[in-house]
Image: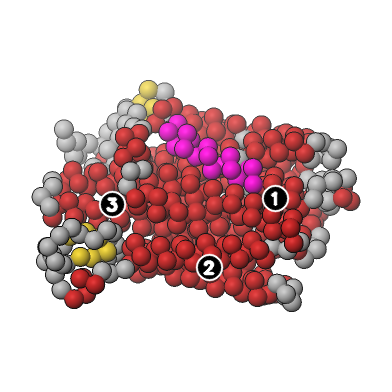
Amino acid sequence: MSTSGRTAAPARQGRWIEHWEPEDPAFWEATGKRVARRNLAFSIFTEHIGFSVWSLWSVMVLFMTPAQGFTLDASDKFLLVSFATLVGAVIRVPYTLAVPRFGGRNWTIVSAAALLVPTVLTAIFMQRPETSFATFMVLAAVTGIGGGNFASSMANISFFYPDRQKGWALGLNAAGGNLGVPAVQLVGLFVIAFFGQANPAYVAMFYLPLLIVAVTGAALYMDNLATARSDVAAQLAVVRDRHAWVMSFLYIGTFGSFIGYGFAFGLVLQTQFGFTPLAAASLTFIGPLLGSLSRPAGGWLADRRGGARVTLWVFIGMALATVGIIAAAPSESLPAFLVGFIALFVLSGLGNGSTYKMIPSIFAAQARSQVEAGADPGEAGRTARRLAAALIGIAGAIGALGGVFINVAFRFSFGSSGTGTAAFVAFLAFYAVCAGLTWRVYLHRPTAARTGPTPTGPTPPGAVPTSTGAARPVLDGV
């Protein structure tokens, strides 16, 4: 039943909103926009802290030097950050499903409060360098739950906003979360600069009051939506679509690179170039900061040039930056290395924005194809939105696994040769595959599309039929 013209505040039971219709312009202007923005603000803050806790061990490993009584080598440290990344990736799927089950406000309170556990334990055990490596592994793994906050936060905010504003809201939410990576590294720099490298516990302790603020803010100012529904059927349906796996693979190359390099940057500087903790901390935040800020620019460029085209050039740029890093290795040129590494951060941020733009475009193109074949436009559009939302969640989880691969590759590379060159060669090959896959699946125009109508027969893979009979790529014109 239409509710156009309804302007009354949504009915609540406790902190539950029973009526929520953001697609109704009158409802949105009267009450929806104000409530949605309030929830978005506290969602961004909590997600930001979650990313910082997730990235906590990218800073802790800088303090773990022999001078402070730690006996871990570079391979051990890369393994620590790999475990944090792995847990953060895997836990994203259940965190996405938790919002409709428990409510966005309720789950934000629980997920933020849960971060107190790894934060307190890290503060305690980083003051005890005699702690076993297995214990440090468990601590690093538990901080990974902070990576799940991204998935639940994105899922929650997507329910609050109308389709016409979801891109803006989710982009702002994602960028605010990503900034948690350079933020914790700036905190680490501050602690090392003013308190010395013997006080790593201060970094973790800095976040304890912020977590309390996040829990309190969520409890007082956020809401649960009774209309939020878990769409397991869409998740099951989308994994049968080949584009789910192609886009997840590409997101490994973009977000996986961002989070993987974010965890590894300082450790690479310390291991390959002999940086002190202070010197490493003074640089590590720059790459993640620029990568976070470039993410919205990637979406903006994709809106104007097409997501696939931007993504293709991103991977070409990442390959070239990697070549520059490899070329700098023999001479151990620090300036060339830093330029290449920071370029990887900026490009990965652009790619994060462009790949997320590609996902709804793919399903919108499929919907247009179905409409041309006689399907109901409204139903085709709704299905496209459901599948796109499901894939964004799945790709976010799979893409984060790229961070694991990057740190494992560095571990083996430094362990076998003492440098990261072998790892960068592997990354170069991967970016080349990503570029080729992007071009082949989304930009390659079949010969028939260039020369005239297609012959009688099935439509080429990766193309949708047009009214003239010509074949065109799925993202043609997007």
Q: For mark 1, give the secondary structure.
A: helix
The amino acid on which the numbered mark 3 sits, given as a three-letter code, is Phe
Q: Is residue 279 visible?
A: no
Magenta-drawn segment: 82-99
Whichever of callouts 1 and 2 sits on the residue coming sooner in the sequence is 1
What's the mark number on residue 363?
Answer: 3
Residue depicted at x 80% and y 47%: 72
Seen from the viewer's position, the closer of residues 75 and 233 is: 75
> Where's the C terminus, which quadrant?
bottom left
Which x, y percent locates residue 302?
37, 64
Circles 1 and 2: CB atoms closer than 8 Å = no
Q: Which mark is residue 378?
A: none
Question: On the image, which quarter does residue 235 sit in?
Answer: top left
Q: Dot 1 surroundings within 10 Å: few (below 14), some, or many (20 or more)?
A: many
Residue 403 % position (x, y):
58, 51
Quadrant (top left, top right, bottom left, bottom right) of the N terminus:
top left
Is there CB contact under 8 Å for labels 3 and 2?
no
Q: Residue at x 37, y 49 (%)?
A: 244
